[in-house]
Amino acid sequence: MSLIEPFKGIRPQKKFVKEISFPNINYINNYKKNKKLNFLNIVNNKSIYKAKQMLLKLEEKKIIKEDNSDHFYLYKITNKKKILFGIVGKINLQNYDDKKILGHEKTFSERIKERKEQLLKFNSQITPIYTAYKINKIFHTKLKLLFKSKPNYSLKSKDNCKHELWIVNKPRLIKSVQNYVNKIRKIYICDGHHRVQAMLKSRRKIAPMIIAFPYEQVNILDYNRVVKTSLNFEKINKIISKNFLIKNLKHNNILKKGEIEMYLNKTWYLLKPLKKSKDLDVTVLKKLILDRILKNNKNLKFISGIKGKKALEKLTNIKKYNLAFKLYPTDISQVISFAENKKFMPQKSTWFHPKPLDGLICSRIIS
């Protein structure tokens, strides 16, 4: 039996797809919530009740509609010269953490509660959980051949990526896709750990919708931190200098693995560790710096690398935060190694880019 199974997808009518399907809010500049019926407003609505009403209206107005039968779906993302070939289906959570479906990242309990409430009240999953799998070169060629026909959807979104979706409903393609997914023996959860944990804790029979990419295609950006601390420069410097050489940066620096950049008092500094460590850079930052200057996580915010250094500078310069840290990106091989060894990275260790759009393909979580 295959790890990935077909399902009844919920899709928008083609004429509405650009209006209602959106990337993660981190790709949107100056977003302001409004009453428009789209998935950006649904996902980022603080009221679950209001968000659910918007979702129901999309169905009532037949802007989105559930397919009549089970299908696999193919999803292609083009980001400049980089292309990701994804297969969308459902997985059985009974296979989670038993060497078939593996996670790698710690989660926040409050975030799990929020996700659980949202998922159960919506009874819908509005974007696939991002996963990866290993594949040999022969099957990599076969994967590309699955995408030869004209897509059912094709659009350029606000993440500056081209998103294409195929409904696998032709006999020859159905057979080819099924033969292909039968060869996938292990799936690694990349992005979506909170949703997976929320489903597991719901104690309902829920099969998550996932998108599976070959791990070689997966791209990870840095996931950075901004901090509000009451400590002055001298105290911060004293704490950090116990484990790092602190150097002023006067020009653009090419950050290397094992190094950390710090922004303080409108100045960038390079932190070079005094001793080599086998830990992840994000773990080193947490253990040797954040845990020593913060009393709790309330004064800590995570910033996607997609925003760049300017976002870190802006947040610290307006005094909402007064300290920022920029990290070297975690590698996909590290993600897989942690998952296979049943180890867990600190929360928010990875930012996967690009991601599928919210609302291009959805699913019921309870039939």
Image (spheres, helix red, strand yellow):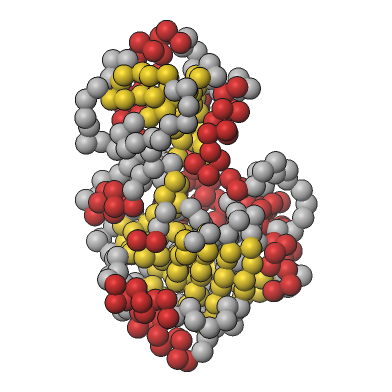
Residue 145: x, y in percent? 42, 81
Q: Residue at x 51, y 89 (%)?
A: 170
Q: Residue furthest bottom?
A: 171
- Name the residue nearer the viewer: 205 or 145: 145
Identify whether 348 is placed above or below 102: above
Identify whether 227 is placed above or below 169: above
Q: Residue at x 76, y 70 (%)?
A: 61
Q: Residue at x 48, y 78 (%)?
A: 147
Q: Quadrant of residue 161?
A: bottom right
Residue 243: x, y in percent? 28, 19
Q: Quadrant of residue 14?
A: bottom right
Q: Quadrant of residue 216?
A: bottom left
- Name the residue nearer the viewer: 266 or 367: 266
Residue 221: x, y in percent? 44, 46
- Name the residue nearer the viewer: 44 or 241: 241
The reply to whether residue 59 is in sight is no
Q: Is residue 56 left or right of residue 331?
A: right
Q: Residue at x 30, y 34 (%)?
A: 258
Residue 357: x, y in percent? 58, 60
How many numbered circles does the render carry?
0
Quarter of the image for the N terminus: give it. bottom left
Q: Residue furthest top?
A: 234
